[in-house]
């Protein structure tokens, strides 16, 4: 991959003011992309803009900030309209913004908070895609990268809203990839691994009574350091680049999957259901019933 594989590309990154989103912004800027950064905190976004420009190492690197609350439909629409006005089009969408929401059994958590998780983690990415896909289709190319999370591939007790939203986001990824297969638009999902971000702090703050089974694991992760955000940011940048052309509809783990060698395995990959969510039937486990 060249040093600036995204030169001339416009990338929109949500949740870009801190944590993984900020690291993704740095990586994309370094790869030559022009950036539209979206997050709730306008002050933090300005700091992120400076850091992204510093990472690019070019004074002329274009980075613009769009403060918005993705829990509000009107703000999503307004941000997309502003980005299209400023950039003319978007080549890369990174749906990274996410909230963990209420922690605890479903029958005991706040319902408004539960619904808000679905809005931010699932409905906002879907709406952003709905608004930007037509332009991508007209241009005949585009990359959409959604960020998965804990609970997407298996049950996650006490985190039902987050797990349900992330699982649905993976299936949305697969569905959009199938809808857009002949359009030149690739849609993939990234599992970033367990990182030491604000979500871990929220989990620890919930204590052993709130987070229950995950509390001890979270303590160990906090002490060990967790997965570096740079691993997921590197995968996102690679998926956004021409190096990943032809790969679509996949959920890839930044930490565990050998994604750098996927291009040489493209034919068998595209003829299989590897890196996808599927139902397990008895025959898959050697059972005859």
Image (cartoon, helix red, strand yellow):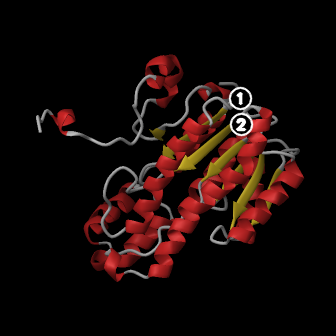
The picture places residue 202, in percent across and down from the top left corner, at 44, 72
Q: Quadrant of the C terminus?
A: top left
What secondary structure is marked by label 2?
loop
> Looking at the picture, does residue 268 appear above or below residue 191?
above
Could you tell me if residue 239 is visible in this image?
A: yes
Depth check: 174 or 262 in front?
A: 174
Is residue 79 rendered to the left or right of residue 210? right
Is residue 91 rendered to the left or right of residue 243? right
Q: Quadrant of residue 162?
A: bottom left
The picture places residue 122, in percent across and down from the top left corner, at 54, 59
Total numbered circles: 2
- Residue placed farthest to the front in the image? 289
Q: Give the residue at mark 1.
A: 3
Q: Earlier in the sequence, mark 1 or mark 2?
A: 1
Depth check: 65 or 152 in front?
A: 152
Could you tell me if residue 10 is visible in this image?
A: no
- Residue placed farthest to the left in the image? 288
Mark 2 Cα within 10 Å, few/some/many (few <14, many 20+)?
many
Mark 1–mark 2 Cα distance, whole angstroms, equals 6 Å
The picture places residue 34, in percent across and down from the top left corner, at 79, 44
> Looking at the picture, does residue 213 appear above or below residue 53?
below
Q: Quadrant of the N terminus?
A: top right
> Looking at the picture, does residue 220 appear above or below residue 140?
below
Q: Are marks 1 and 2 in contact (CB under 8 Å)?
A: yes
Q: Quadrant of residue 213?
A: bottom left
Mark 1 Cα within 10 Å, few/some/many (few <14, many 20+)?
few
Is residue 188 rendered to the left or right of residue 167? right
What secondary structure is marked by label 1?
loop
Q: Give the residue at mark 2.
A: 31
> Looking at the picture, does residue 56 appear above or below residue 219?
above
The residue located at (88%, 44%) in the rendering is 60
Q: Quadrant of residue 181?
A: top right
């Amino acid at each position: 991959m060249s040093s600036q594989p995204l030169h001339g590309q416009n990338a929109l990154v949500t949740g870009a003011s801190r944590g993984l989103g900020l690291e993704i912004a740095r990586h994309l800027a370094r790869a030559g992309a022009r950036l539209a950064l979206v997050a709730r905190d306008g002050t933090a976004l300005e700091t992120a803009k400076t850091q992204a420009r510093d990472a690019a190492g070019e004074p002329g690197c274009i980075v613009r900030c769009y403060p918005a609350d993705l829990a509000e439909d009107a703000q999503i629409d307004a941000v997309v309209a502003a980005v299209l006005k400023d950039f003319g089009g978007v080549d890369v969408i990174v749906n990274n913004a996410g909230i963990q929401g209420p922690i605890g059994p479903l029958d005991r958590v706040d319902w408004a908070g539960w619904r808000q998780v679905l809005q931010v983690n699932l409905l906002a990415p879907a709406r952003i895609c709905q608004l930007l896909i037509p332009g991508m289709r007209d241009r005949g190319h585009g990359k959409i990268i959604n960020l998965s999370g804990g609970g997407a591939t298996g049950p996650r007790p006490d985190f039902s809203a987050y797990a349900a939203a992330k699982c649905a986001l993976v299936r949305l990824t697969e569905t959009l990839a199938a809808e857009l297969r002949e359009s030149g638009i690739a849609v993939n999902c990234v599992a970033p691994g367990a990182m030491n971000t604000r979500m871990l702090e929220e989990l620890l703050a919930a204590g052993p009574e709130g987070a229950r089974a995950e509390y001890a694991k979270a303590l160990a992760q906090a002490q060990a350091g967790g997965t570096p955000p740079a691993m997921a940011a590197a995968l996102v940048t690679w998926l956004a680049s021409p190096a990943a052309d032809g790969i679509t509809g996949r959920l890839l783990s930044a930490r565990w999957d050998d994604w750098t060698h996927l291009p040489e395995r493209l034919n068998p990959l595209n003829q299989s259901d590897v890196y996808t969510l599927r139902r397990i039937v008895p025959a898959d486990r050697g059972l005859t019933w």
